[in-house]
Image: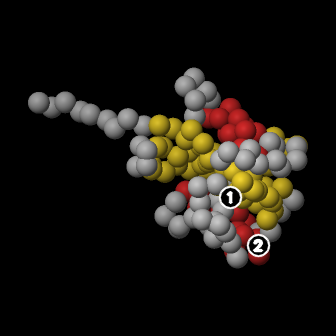
Amino acid sequence: CGAVCYAPISPAVITAVERDGKLLLAHNVAWPEGRYSIIAGFVEPGERLEEAVRREIREEVNISVKGLKYFGSQTWPFPNSLMLGFTAEYESGEIQPDGTEISHAGFFSTDEVRAMGIPDKASIARKLIDSFLDSH
């Protein structure tokens, strides 16, 4: 019939936050112990990507960020997401995990990050983490 169909996409943001040469990593309550990644979450209807980055980080670990820069994107089939990656700098606040999604979080040195269970190389999360490691 010639009809073109597009898959429904749910936009999500994922952000590598740096503070004094260290990277913010968090442990999600649903993950095995020892696995860490960077903060991510879905964009709400009508929300700008930059607003979503700031909101997700504030909601999940209670800190503020500045200096957002677009990093890249990745389609992600679970659940039909388009992951939009950013980097940011710590601005203010004390880390306080929300206890619902995040059980613990902190800023980690390059040596600490390399020793942790981090996402697979195929993910944008890992590309953001590797970019941080390569730049330090």
Residue that numbered label 2 is attached to: 112
**Quadrant holding the N terminus:** top left
Q: Residue at x 15, y 31 (%)?
A: 2
Image spot of residue 117 (x, y percent)? 63, 70
| Label 2 – label 1 distance at C-alpha | 14 Å
Q: How many marks?
A: 2
Residue that numbered label 1 is attached to: 27
Looking at the rendered structure, the kind of residue marked 2 is: Glu
Q: Is residue 42 left or right of residue 16?
A: left
Q: Residue at x 75, y 56 (%)?
A: 104
Q: Nearer the viewer, mark 2 or mark 1?
A: 1
**Quadrant holding the C terminus:** bottom right
Tag 2: Cα neighbours inside 10 Å, few (<14), some, or many (≥20)? few
Q: Residue at x 87, y 59 (%)?
A: 20
Out of 105 and 76, give the one closest to the viewer.
105
| Callout 2: SS | helix
Looking at the rendered structure, the kind of residue marked 1 is: His
In which quadrant of the rendered view does residue 127 lie? bottom right
Q: Is residue 120 left or right of residue 118?
A: left
Q: Residue furthest left?
A: 1
Image spot of residue 12 (x, y percent)? 55, 41
Residue 18 seen:
yes
Out of 97 and 37, give the one closest to the viewer.
97
Q: Residues at badges 2 and 1 in contact (C-beta under 8 Å)?
A: no
